[in-house]
Amino acid sequence: MNAVNASATARRNAAPNSTVGLIAAYEKALTLGPNVEDEITDVEITAAATALASLSKPGVPEEPVKVLNERLGLKIDPESAVFDQIVDEAREIQAARQ
């Protein structure tokens, strides 16, 4: 979780598979505008879920995802279908990797 404190510049310049780079990929996939949940596409959900699957502990616990979203300033309601889709897809990606 400390990597989420990296500056925007550090996230932009991070190696793609580093923790900071994965956080940047997650953030980029979900940073679309003021109404993210109305605008997000399946491609962006998959991009966010793929990064999240690599970032997260097995099973993708929801609480750290909520904290990550808050620290990044992402406006995703943890009770929304979008949040559930991202977490569920991240779990599926993790399971497929095993």
Image (spheres, rainbow, N blue to C red):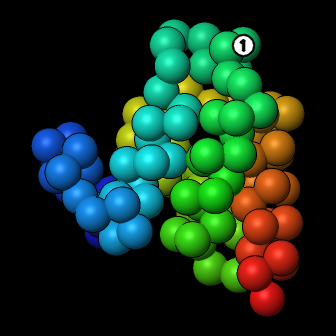
> Position of 95 compared to 19: left or right?
right
Q: Which residue is tagged 1?
A: 38
Residue 26 lies left or right of residue 12; in this view the side is right
What residue type is disc 1 on? Asp
Q: Up-down: is 11 above or below 19?
A: above
**In the rendered view, does 22 fall on the left or right side of 34?**
left
Residue 68: percent from left, percent from top: 48, 52
Quadrant location, the N terminus: bottom left
Q: Secondary structure at mark 1?
A: helix
- Where is 43 relative to 23, above or below? above
Quarter that holds the C terminus: bottom right
Indicate the position of residue 69 as horizontal and vertical percent values: 51, 44
Residue 48 versus residue 97 in the image, above or below: above
Nearer to the camera, 42 or 68? 42
The structure residue drawn at horizontal position 18% and vertical position 51%, both measured from the top left corner, is 13
Q: At 72% from the left edge and 13% from the top edge, which residue is drawn?
A: 38
